[in-house]
């Protein structure tokens, strides 16, 4: 069994040498919270230590035993090992790193949450979901709730004593939130209280035994509400009633009707919840009774970024396992001596096809990390910049990138885990190695929190059109500025040229879609048919630019090492790379970006060619029934 490994060197490179933790920590918001680069680096080291020693060991039990539904009591149990790990996790403050210190949070930057999230999620995805959900639910209450609601709920949620969920999906209304039938009827004489009735399905950690109390955020419709999403309110519905002194009372008529039997993430219970089955379920309204979907979108968008991070974590875990296996597995001789039966056997990392698979995995893992960490950086700059114009600019970038982070990273992660399984050969198909579980666990990330098809439509229909398209244009201009700098760098000029060619194809598709959107012919369907391809192109281009930007930094650091070592010719430089771990890292960083520019960005060329066919046959085709 491969041990849990994380590419800490690349994490630290992105945080410190690319983004610069000092740039974030020097913002007044984080100066006030006491954050500094040394502290954040130390916390990330501690996260890795805890993930490796405490969290990763429960992953096998999480998968093999999983969550169990107890029909007699209508409750859910998690694997026994979860309980002690959960207590250790919350006692160390990991459930509330970015939340308001006034209510028990640390007030740390989002970039810490993203890096630590990658580390913990890769160790055991099922386990890490609960504190992530609670954190996001608390953020909704903190942002939109009254002082009364904040004082009542936040501290116990942020300390992990109470858990939180998001209750959006219903059996007859999956992605169509406006079709929600759950009702909320005002309670006479109790202002702000409503009687809740309805069924919510696919609720992650909707019931469990890790905390006594669970705070459900429930979308429901009041009697006078208009149809559609504009008529939905958001309600806090606790599993147990809460006394005036915040002690727990009796049940609040929230009954778990069962949990799903799933392909992966077995340790995370996915529950069906019946609210008000006995007409005795009560909840408190958050804000305006018609603004619930707006409030919930704060949590949904946080969760979408978290799901993108889940993709990165599982892809990276699978890649690290494949890399370790390839470095240790001896099979076959060197390809140049394959016809010689007496030739010594070599580890499979020496075989060209294995190296190809590993290189694709490495490139995509670093690409996902670059995208997600950069988005977290934009969040911190958007929250912490003193200039209002800058805050709006950065938060606009975050909104634009959110569907890309979610969909691109999760689709890409599935490719990575597929290649990781393939790298293991027959062992990859067996449970002895973690790649097969990573592949099973990661598939859901393309589905929940809005399927990737919905993310593509969100990008196409909403995010690209924000503020008359000005957010998109500002972002593209920023990318152009980065490419202009990379064009002038001898180490990255050729890579930049190839990424720019891919970007030109993306630009052409964006312009074409704008034209087609105005038509009334069948060709108006072309943008909708190809929305997922557009999102993939966006992800490929943005990641390519970020990777080449990282390569420019790495190339400078590598040249400095060569100079320090007195290595002037190619032979001497190869010797330095062989002997120095830092030189090896920087050299590999440059070569990975080069591989991406030479190979992976080329996907944009054939995608553009296919889209420009303007084919609408899938809308006209028929799918005969089987007989």
Image: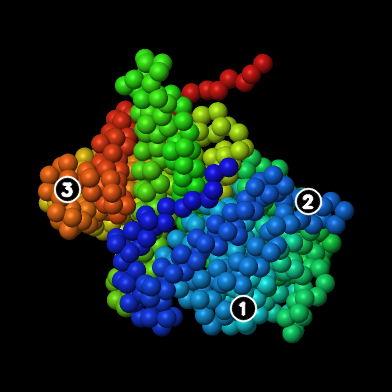
Q: Is residue 270 visible?
A: no
| Residue appearing at x 50%, y 76% in the figure | 106
Pointer 2 or 1: first along the chain: 2
Q: Position of residue 310 (x, y in %)?
A: 51, 52
Residue nearest the observer in this picture, 393 or 348: 348
Pointer 1 or 3: first along the chain: 1
Q: Which mark is residue 69?
A: 2
Image-based side of 59 in relation to 271, left or right: left
Quadrant in which the C terminus is drawn: top right
Residue nearest the observer in this picture, 316 or 252: 316
Identify the residue position indicated by label 3 in the image: 491
| Spatial separation of the CA atoms under disc 1 and disc 3 | 51 Å
Q: Position of residue 516 (x, y in %)?
A: 32, 39
| Residue appearing at x 58%, y 83% in the figure | 147
Q: Badges 2 and 3: C-beta atoms under 8 Å apart?
A: no
Res 609 quadrant in image? top left
Identify the residue position indicated by label 1 in the image: 155
Pointer 2 or 3: first along the chain: 2
| Spatial separation of the CA atoms under disc 2 and disc 3 | 57 Å
| Spatial separation of the CA atoms under disc 2 and disc 1 | 29 Å
The residue most toward the right is 72
Mark 2 lies on a secondary structure that is strand
Q: Which mark is residue 141?
A: none
């Amino acid at each position: 069994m491969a041990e849990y490994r994380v590419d800490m060197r690349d994490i630290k490179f992105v945080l410190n040498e690319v983004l610069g933790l000092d740039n974030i920590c020097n913002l007044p918001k984080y100066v006030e919270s006491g954050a500094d680069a040394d502290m954040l680096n130390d916390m990330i080291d501690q996260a890795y230590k805890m993930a490796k020693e405490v969290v990763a060991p429960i992953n096998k039990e999480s998968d093999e035993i999983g969550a169990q539904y107890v029909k007699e009591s209508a409750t859910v149990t998690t694997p026994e090992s979860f309980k002690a790990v959960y207590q250790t996790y919350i006692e160390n403050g990991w459930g509330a790193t970015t939340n308001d210190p006034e209510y028990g949070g640390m007030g740390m930057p989002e970039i810490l949450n993203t890096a630590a999230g990658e580390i913990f999620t890769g160790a055991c995805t099922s386990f890490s979901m609960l504190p992530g959900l609670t954190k996001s639910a608390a953020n909704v209450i903190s942002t939109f709730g009254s002082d009364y609601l904040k004082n009542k709920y936040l501290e116990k949620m942020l300390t992990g004593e109470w858990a939180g969920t998001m209750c959006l999906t219903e059996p007859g209304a999956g992605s169509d939130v406006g079709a929600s039938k759950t009702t909320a009827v005002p309670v006479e004489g109790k202002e702000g209280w409503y009687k809740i009735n309805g069924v919510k399905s696919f609720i992650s950690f909707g019931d469990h035994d890790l905390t006594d109390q669970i705070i459900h955020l429930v979308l429901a419709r009041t009697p006078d509400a208009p149809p559609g999403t504009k008529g939905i309110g958001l309600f806090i519905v606790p599993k147990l009633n809460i006394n005036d002194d915040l002690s727990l009372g009796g049940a609040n008529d929230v009954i778990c009707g069962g949990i799903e039997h799933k392909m992966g993430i077995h340790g995370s219970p996915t529950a069906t919840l019946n609210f008000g089955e006995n007409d005795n379920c009560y909840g408190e309204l958050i804000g305006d009774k018609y603004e619930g979907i707006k409030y919930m979108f704060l949590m949904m968008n946080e969760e979408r970024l978290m799901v993108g991070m889940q993709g990165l974590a599982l892809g990276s875990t699978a890649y690290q396992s494949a890399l370790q296996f390839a470095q240790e597995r001896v099979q076959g001789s060197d390809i140049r001596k394959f016809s010689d039966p007496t030739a010594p056997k070599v580890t499979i990392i020496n075989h060209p096809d294995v190296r190809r698979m590993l290189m694709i995995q490495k490139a995509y893992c670093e690409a996902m990390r670059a995208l997600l960490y950069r988005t977290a950086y934009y969040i911190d700059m958007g929250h912490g910049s003193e200039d209002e114009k800058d805050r709006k600019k950065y938060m606009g970038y975050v909104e634009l990138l959110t569907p890309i982070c979610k969909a691109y990273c999760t689709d890409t992660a599935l490719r990575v885990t597929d290649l990781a399984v393939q790298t293991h050969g027959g062992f990859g198909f067996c449970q002895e190695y973690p790649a097969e579980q990573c592949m099973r666990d990661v598939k859901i990330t393309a589905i929940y929190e809005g399927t990737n098809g919905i993310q593509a439509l969100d990008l196409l229909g909403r995010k690209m059109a924000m503020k008359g398209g000005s957010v998109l244009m500002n972002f593209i201009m920023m990318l152009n500025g980065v490419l202009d700098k990379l064009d002038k760098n001898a180490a990255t000029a050729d890579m930049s040229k190839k990424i720019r060619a891919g970007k030109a194809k993306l630009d052409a598709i964006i312009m074409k879609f704008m034209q087609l959107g105005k038509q009334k012919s069948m060709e108006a369907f072309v943008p909708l048919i190809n929305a997922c391809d557009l999102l993939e192109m966006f992800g490929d281009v943005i990641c390519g630019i970020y990777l080449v930007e990282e390569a420019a930094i790495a190339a400078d650091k590598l040249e400095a090492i060569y100079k320090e070592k007195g290595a002037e010719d190619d032979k001497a430089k190869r010797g330095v790379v062989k002997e120095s771990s830092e030189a090896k890292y920087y050299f590999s960083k440059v070569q990975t970006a080069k591989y991406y520019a030479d190979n992976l960005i080329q996907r944009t060329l054939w995608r553009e060619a296919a889209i420009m066919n303007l084919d609408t046959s899938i809308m006209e085709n028929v799918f005969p029934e089987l007989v």
